[in-house]
Structure formats: C-alpha cells, structure tokens
Amino acid sequence: MSSTTEAITGGRLMVELLEEAGVEIVFGYPGGAILPFYDELYHSKKIKHILVRHEQGAVHMAEGYARSTGKLGVCIATSGPGATNLITGLTDAKLDSIPILAITGQVSTDAIGTDAFQEADIFGITIPITKYNALIKKADDLSRHFEEAIKIAMGGRPGPVLLDFPKDVQLEKTTVRKASALKIAPHHYERPKVKGDAQAFAEVLNGAKRPLLYVGGGAINSFASAEIKALAEKANAPVTTTLMGLGAFPGTHPLSVGMLGMHGTAYANKAVLECDYILNLGARFDDRVAKYQDFAPNAIRAHVDIDAAEFNKRINVDHILHGDLKDAIREILPFVKGGDRTSWIENIQSLKKNHPLDFDNSGDSIKPQDFLQRVYTKTKGEAIVSTDVGQHQMWAAQYYLFDKPNTWLTSGGLGTMGYGLPAAIGAKFGNPDKMVICVTGDGSFQMCIQELATIAQSKLGVKILLFNNNFLGMVRQWQELFYEERFSESQWTYNPNFVKLADAYGIPAMRIEHKSEIDKGVDFFLKDNGSALIEVMIPAEEKVFPMIPAGKSQQDLIEFKDLGKLKK
Amino acid sequence: MKHTLSILVNNHPGVMSHVSGLFTRRGYNIDSIAVGVTDNADVSSMTIVLNGDDFIVGQVKNQLLKLPDVLKVQDMAYASSVQRELVLVSFSITESNRSEALTICNGFDVKILEMTEDSLLIEFSGNSRQVSNVISVIKPFGIREISRTGQIAIAYRNQNSV
Ligand SMILES: Cc1ncc(C[n+]2csc(CCOP(=O)(O)OP(=O)(O)O)c2C)c(N)n1
C-alpha cells in the first residue's frame, strides 16, 4: 500500500481514483449525503458529469455506455431515495452481466441505523443484485474497496458493484491510496487460464455432422466476435445467437441463422431441433431459449463459459470448457477441422427458405416490421440500436440485422421497460460519431420519458422511433392468444400527444399513420445528426411471430403462417 | 440428503449476509449455520448444514465460490469428518422421576450443569443425530428451554482413518 504525502478528503480521493482509472463520464443526481463528493467533482477537469432527471436514468445510461463501449459505466446517487432509484438498473446489469460502478451517498456513520433522514440500508438492499458491494466506514479503507470494486465489476463475468459512501467519510482525510494500476479499459483484466482439454473438446465438434453454434451475451463481454467468426467458418457450422448475443456474429453472414428462442426465427429453432451437436458459447441456457431438459434433443451439448456456476445449472451438458470465451476459442481453433457439412448447410438453407420471418403487409396501415427494415436499409445497418421491452423489442431484434458487437442494447435478462431511452443516451455519449436509435413503445417510453430533458440539455443526437399501438402491445398479444381477448388493463385510454411533448423539449418530431408516409417519415427521422422523434402509428392487433408459447418448447413453435392454429 | 459445507470466509461485516442471502435467494433452506473466527483473525469458518441433492449442493458451492469474500468451500463427507453440535437443555423433573432422569443422563454421557428441586440443566455434545436422540429421550420429562449451536465440522487429516 502506497501513501501520498498530503492528506486529502475521501471525496477528493474518490474523484482522483476515478480519474486515474480512466473514467471520463459519469451519470448522476446530487443530494445532501453525496454533496462533499460532488463538491470535489466540481473541480475535475477529466470527468464529465451528466445530470439526469431520475436516478433510474443514470444507471441505464451507464449501462448503455458500458455495453456500447465495453468500458465501465459509472453512476452516482445520493442516499435513501436516490440510492433506491438505482435498484432496477442494478438488477438489470446483474442479469445481463454489465460492468457498472454505482456510488451512493450515505448518512454519516454516527447516524447509520437510526432511521436518519434519507437513510436506507442500500448495502443490505443491494446484496442480491450486485456482484460486490461495500459500505465504506473509514476514508483509509476507500482505496482498497475502490480497487476491489473495479476489479470485480470488470473482471471475469462482469457485473454491477456498489460503494456506499457516508457523508463524514467523504470529508474525512486520508493518506492511504493504492489502486493506481486500475484501468477501466475493455478486457483489461487478467483472465484465469482456460480449464479443460481444448483438443478433446474440439474433436467432439469435428465428429459432428450437424453442428450448431449458440452464441450468447458472454461473446460480447469477452470481445470474442473475431474468434467466433473464425470458428464458424473453419468448422463450417451455422450460428444462432440469443437476444443478448445479437451482433457477436454478423447477422448478414451466410452461416447466420439469426436469433433463437421464444421469438427467434423458425429456422434457428428448427436447427436446434435437428442439430447433432450444439456448442454454447457464453450463453446461459436462459429459460426463454431452452425451456426444458429436452433442449436440442438430438445433440451432444457442449458449453464454454467464464462462470463455472453456469455449467449444468439449467441444462445438463456433455462437454465443458471453463474460461474466457476469446481465450477458449483460441485454444480450440487449431484443433478444429472443416469436414464436409454440405448437406447440413443445404438443410439450413432450405429451412431459411421455407420458414422465413414473415408478416402481412397488404393493408394501408404501417407495419413495424416494414418500417424497421427500411430503417435498416437506410442506415446500412450501422446504427447502434437500443430498445425498450415488448413487441417493438422483438421486431427490432428480428428485422434489424446486427453485424457488429456492442451495437445492440436491450434489457435481456430482466426485461426492463424504461431501459431504452436512457441506454441510448449513454451509448451516444460513448459513441458521439455513431447514429444511435432508440426503438420504443408507447408504454415503455413513458417509464423514463423525463430523460428527454437530458437529450435536450446536452444537445444530443439521439433518434427515437416510437411505435404507438395505444396498448401495452406484448401484454395485449398474450391476452389475445391465451386469455380469450380479455384486455385487462393493457389499453391506454390516455396517451399524451408525443409530438407536442417532444416539441416541448425542443426535439423535432413527426407522426405518421399511413403507409404512403413511410418514406417521408424515414427521411425526416434520419436526415441529420440531430435528435428526432418519429411516432409511427401501428395496428394494435399486430403480433410478434414466430412465437413459442409460454411454457412450451421448440417443437411447439408457431409461425406467422400458422396463426390460425393458436386460436382454437 | 444432508450435506455439511465447511466454508472459510473473510472476517468482514456483511459477509454473513452475503452468504445467507445466497441461500434465501435460491430458496434453499439452511438446516443450521455455525460461525466462528479461526486462528487467523481475518478469517472466519462457517459450517452450514443443508438438505439437498448433489445438483443443489453443487450449485450452492459454485455460487458461494463466486462471492469475493469466500475463500474455500468444502463438502464434508460424513464418514471422513468429525461433526459436532452442542446443546443446552433445561427440563422438568419430579421426585418420582428424578433418578430415572439421572440414569438417562449417565447413560448418554450428558453433563449436568445445575440441578434444582424440579429441574435439570444439562449439556450434551455429539453429532446431530446423537443430539436429536438425547432431546427425544428428555422430551417426555417436559423441556423448559433448549439451545442448540448448530453443527460444526472438520475433516480428518487421514482420510483412511475411518
Ligand atoms: C418495468 C416493467 N413493468 C412491466 C413489464 C411487463 N411488460 C412486458 S412488455 C409490456 C408491454 C410493453 O408495452 P410497450 O412499451 O407499449 O411496447 P409494445 O409491446 O406495445 O411494443 C409490459 C407491460 C415490464 N417488462 N417492465
């Protein structure tokens, strides 16, 4: 442990440690218990602070920033209500393995436990939803906790960490400082050696006639895209990705079969049924993908993951390789042989041809799938896309093809409505030169709608694509299909005038309702680098297909063309 | 099936919550938990007894190892470890059954800590099954108060000794 000669306050030390780690931007909201820290932040020339309108916005922005850059996302809140407003976002980051550092103010140490003004036991509250958390009791301990927190957030399977920082500790002086070696750079931390016999592992793949790679969010966290592409091409194996894995393998690649799972493509789900070998690369056999033990019923199952706790957690596997995905694939690659897989690839091609993604585009109304396809074409697939949760999320996953990692930001594990807008804002701060589009629904948008002000205040060029069906569309879809059209509390009998609302924030906006207006709408929406909102009115009855009904498995997949089967 | 996990953790505030929270979160029931500091003041030892099949226990172990403050997790096989629990029981006696009570205590190697006109306070240690046995034999007398420590365990050095 090194020491500085000069004693500085805890608040000052925290700002210096953040600067040294390379943190350039933080998202937050001040309050009494965090004021000493904010006072020190005032003097920082290296750290830009974005003032949000709600702490939930701050944590989702940090997530969007982290996912799109691969760096650590940092958010700040005061004690009590400020801190509890972070809960949803921290849970979201835990489930999707996003590296987030949350710094919260806490009441003074002598007041802790007395139900003091704005006191909440945020340490206790966040135990189950953080990878690591700590209450800093002395300024002398700060450095140690800070180092621990960043290493844990960024290392191994990434995740959120929280440091709770009492007001008096922010003011207390200390000379104890280490942690200068910390960096928030992507993939900076040492990875444990890959455990398992890579050669034996590869030979099982070599022996397969109908192999399928199943790629998850871990591929993004491990920056393993190039390795996955090399593996797929060398093995001549088709690739499906989870919702979280979109972009880890190019969606336009001939070997891509798109997304699998509840709303995945029919051909991906059918490929899972037909493959004789499935190699899970950094996915977690999520229950929206692999409902039962009979997942990939005819296949040898293999799994590569950095988190040993994922092995055999939901689905039993036959072969395991434990370690960072990028490293693991590098170890496997030299042993992988091509093999003749022509008939399997042909089989996949015919599945693609006979079971395409499909929708009815005959009427005058605008179909979200059509609109998204046009946005895809117009942006040449180069935008960063964030979404909220619902039908629009699934349409975006299906119809916007992602070729690059870190360009698809969605709440996969938790399914958090309200995520999309702030995540887009965070991504735009991290990628000022890229186009960032938030695809949202009229329900989700209203959950963090106040962050429009953050866009306006920073003059940020975030594009908002709002699909308005005047419904909680996904809820409606389930009610239509499984609850005999009892639309209990899913219809909005009041929605604001979204165009006027955007206008109130100085964000150019437009509404379109008819197919004839699509081109005009897309042009308006994407015309320059500035912010814009387009409200696209879509039919409430439009549904997401294919669909595996809740609780069913791959065999029960329903495509657009078998819609009739659903309504008995 | 009962499993006994012996866990070494950093002796920090909050570690106990982290560990027990992990069980709550997954809906696993803890039968007993006993904690004490080791010869190293920075390290505590926890013994957790839980009911579950090998799959559940394997999951618990994996999840425990993910906690930064957990240093070591050992699943104690019954045969190759010593398992002990301490119990203190105070129970009623009468003139007519006093000698019967004392005979029982003798037979079970129970330590008597206090005897009054109408009560006995005893101490007993053994594995959990033995402790439960003693309690069931005492029960008909009328238990007034009981305090069990929960099980602690340690592996034999020589794994062939049993
Ligand atoms: C915070 C939160 N509350 C409730 C839900 C449950 N939920 C999932 S989708 C959905 C409807 C979303 O409606 P909208 O944002 O309008 O999108 P659409 O499905 O119409 O595209 C709801 C309520 C959720 N995912 N998150």
Image (cartoon, helix red, strand yellow):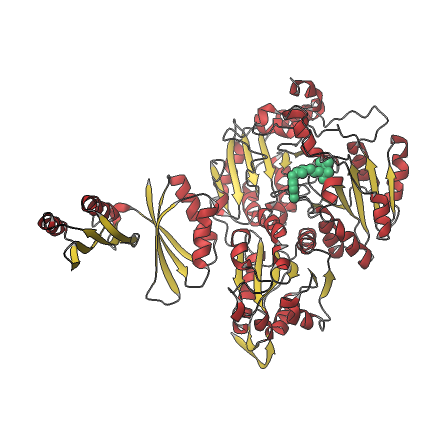
**Residue in the image at 85% along x and 51% along y:** A504
Residue A558 location (% of width, % of height): 65, 24
- Occupied quadrant, residue A475: top right
Residue A411 x %, y %: 65, 44
- Which residue is situated farthest in the bottom direction here? A5
Position of residue A568 in the picture relative to residue B129 (left or right): right
Q: Nearer the viewer, residue A465 or A557?
A: A465
Query: Does residue B82 lie above or below A209 as drawn?
Result: below
Tell me residue B23's x, y (percent).
44, 48
Residue A348 seen: yes
Check the image and report above or below for A105 versus A538: below
Count every numbered label the image shows and give the total: 0
Measuring 52% from the left and 51% from the top, which residue is drawn there?
A128
Of A63 and A89, which appears nearest the observer? A89
Can residue A131 be seen from the camera position used here? no
* Quadrant into which the C terminus of chain A falls: top right
Q: Nearer the viewer, residue A509 or A109?
A: A109
Up the image or down, A2 lies above or below A554; here it is: below
Q: Left or right: where does residue A198 sit relative to residue A20? A: left
Ligand 1 occupies quarter: top right
Drawn side of residue A464 relative to residue A176, left or right = right
Foreground pick, A465 / A297: A465
- Place of residue A287 in the rendered image (x, y in percent of width and height, measured from the top left): 56, 36
* Image side of residue A550 versus residue A562, left or right: left
